[in-house]
């Protein structure tokens, strides 16, 4: 992947996450931090996709790094981590796969449906696992600082 | 704690929990914060039962009749600002032992409205999907069609419910049908050659992605019932969205 492509991917991840951040009701002052969450997740995803070929693993690593970013920013700004966690994870959600799976279901195309179901399960499991490990590491700190 | 005070606390707790859940708070978070509030007033073991649209709290004070509250929780509309303020209020209660009589006032001081007006939220989603359009390769005209489609779909979801209340799943289907129709009209008039791709991009904006992740997290945390119900809700909503797009493909001469 060329540098220009990576930079464009980062730029569009940033704008995409800011767009979702507005929909999630994140205040103006925190939108940039939320946008950066998307950039971090996207960069990790690009790197991991080329190193790890299993969707479960590369999604999990990207979600884990996104969650750690959300934890660190949440601690720094003393706000709930959910504010940065959702924007970090939103780019990983396999909406296209879910849609294709249901379309295959509507058209009674069972092999295609099963194929997409497996990919969907891998991606969702990866995101869920990645986003659960981060908060475990910082739980006691957050309790101490009431965030 | 006196009976009157306990009743006030229960009223507050059930409203607090419902608002937290409707603003996108996960079930584990709601459970955690409600325990925090009850502990602040010396109630060590409240019984809290939660499902995606139900909240039940029961407390058994010493030598008194048990007190119970139940609330039906409305549709989830992710509002991080409200969620953060509710989170902060719970910790404030825990640290400062606020008098029970002032709790409702403090809760009502937190706005239920998102920090942005509805047109701005629609613009936000359009920006997000235009950016996704770059990743998927929909092109410039594709981006325009996606933006118009999502604006119509979200506008329908936001305003139609107030003018003419309909079933939520039906509303999902109608809005995705309208978005799909915009894309199909663009395809028929030669503005774009791949309607299927544009529908996928629009679908990403309409499916309940965050509840889907929360469903998996709940199940992995051992809350299989609430996680399963969340998953089913998300699945049905996505099915309704896909059916809407499919209908537009069939009506406008289809590519399937």
Image (cartoon, coloured by chain):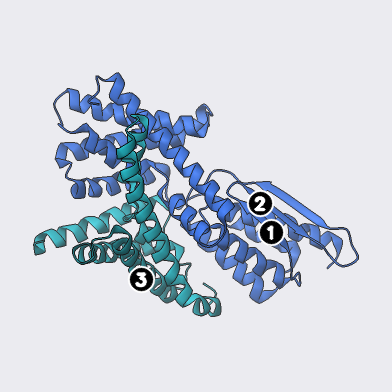
Chain colours: A cyan, B blue
Judging by the rendered image, the residue that carries numbered circle 3 is: A69
Query: Could you tell me which residue is drawn at 16 percent across and 23 percent down?
Result: B189
Give the mark nearer the N terminus: 2 vs 1: 1
Residue found at the far front of this picture: A111
**Label for residue A110?**
none
Q: Indicate which label's residue lies in the foreground, 3 or 1.
A: 1
Circle 3 packing at 10 Å, graded few (<14), some (14-19), many (20+), is many
Q: Position of residue B2 (x, y in %)?
A: 86, 65
Would residue B123 be visible to someone looking at this image?
no
- Find numbered disc 2 in the image and state the secondary structure of the residue it sits on: strand
- For the residue pair B35 and A31, the one nearer the viewer reads as B35
Judging by the rendered image, the residue that carries numbered circle 2 is: B55
In space, the residues marked 3 and 1 are separated at their CA atoms by: 32 Å
> Toward which corner of the image does residue A73 lie, by quadrant?
bottom left
- Find numbered disc 3 in the image and state the secondary structure of the residue it sits on: helix
Circle 1 packing at 10 Å, graded few (<14), some (14-19), many (20+), is some
- For the residue pair A107 and B47, the one nearer the viewer reads as A107
Answer with left or right where residue B87 lies relative to residue A98.
right
Q: Are marks 3 and 2 on the same chain?
A: no
- Find numbered disc 1 in the image and state the secondary structure of the residue it sits on: strand
Judging by the rendered image, the residue that carries numbered circle 1 is: B48
Would residue B196 be visible to someone looking at this image?
yes
Circle 2 packing at 10 Å, graded few (<14), some (14-19), many (20+), is many
Q: Is residue A129 above or below residue B212?
A: below
Circles 2, 1 touching at the beta carbon (< 8 Å)? yes
Q: Chain of mark 1?
A: B
Answer with left or right where residue A113 lies relative to residue B27.
left
- For the residue pair A19 and A66, the one nearer the viewer reads as A66
Query: Could you tell me which residue is drawn at 64 percent across and 76 percent down?
Result: B95
């Amino acid at each position: 992947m060329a540098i220009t492509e990576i930079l464009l991917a980062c730029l569009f991840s940033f704008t995409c996450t800011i767009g979702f951040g507005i929909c999630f009701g994140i205040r103006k002052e925190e939108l940039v931090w939320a946008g950066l969450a998307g950039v971090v997740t996207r960069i990790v995803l690009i790197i991991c996709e080329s190193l790890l070929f299993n969707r479960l693993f590369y999604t999990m690593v990207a979600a884990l790094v996104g969650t750690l970013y959300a934890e660190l920013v949440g601690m720094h700004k003393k706000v709930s981590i959910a504010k940065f966690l959702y924007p970090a994870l939103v780019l990983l959600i396999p909406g296209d796969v879910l849609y294709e799976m249901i379309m295959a279901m509507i058209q009674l195309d069972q092999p295609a449906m099963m194929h997409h179901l497996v990919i969907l399960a891998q991606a969702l499991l990866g995101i869920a696992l990645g986003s659960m490990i981060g908060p475990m590491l910082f739980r006691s700190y957050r309790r101490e600082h009431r965030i | 704690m006196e009976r009157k005070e306990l009743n006030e606390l229960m009223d507050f707790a059930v409203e607090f929990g419902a608002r937290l859940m409707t603003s996108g708070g996960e079930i584990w978070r709601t459970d955690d914060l409600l325990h925090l509030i009850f502990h602040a007033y010396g109630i060590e073991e409240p019984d809290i039962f939660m499902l995606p649209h139900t909240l039940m709290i029961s407390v058994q004070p010493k030598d008194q009749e048990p007190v119970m509250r139940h609330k039906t929780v409305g549709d989830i509309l992710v509002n991080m600002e409200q969620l953060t303020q509710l989170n902060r209020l719970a910790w404030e209660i825990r640290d400062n032992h606020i008098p029970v009589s002032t709790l409702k006032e403090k809760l009502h001081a937190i706005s239920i409205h998102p920090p942005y007006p509805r047109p701005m939220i629609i613009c936000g989603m359009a920006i997000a999907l235009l950016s996704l359009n770059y990743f998927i390769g929909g092109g410039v005209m594709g981006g325009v069609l996606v933006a118009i489609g999502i604006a119509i779909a979200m506008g329908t979801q936001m305003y139609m419910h107030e003018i003419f209340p309909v079933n939520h799943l039906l509303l999902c289907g109608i809005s995705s049908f309208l978005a799909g129709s915009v894309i199909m009209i663009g395809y028929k008039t030669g503005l774009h050659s791949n309607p299927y791709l544009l529908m996928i991009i629009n679908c990403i904006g309409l499916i309940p992605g965050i509840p889907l992740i929360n469903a998996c997290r709940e199940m992995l945390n051992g809350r299989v019932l609430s996680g399963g119900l969340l998953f089913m809700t998300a699945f049905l909503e996505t099915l309704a969205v896909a059916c809407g797009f499919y209908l537009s493909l069939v009506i406008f001469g289809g590519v399937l």
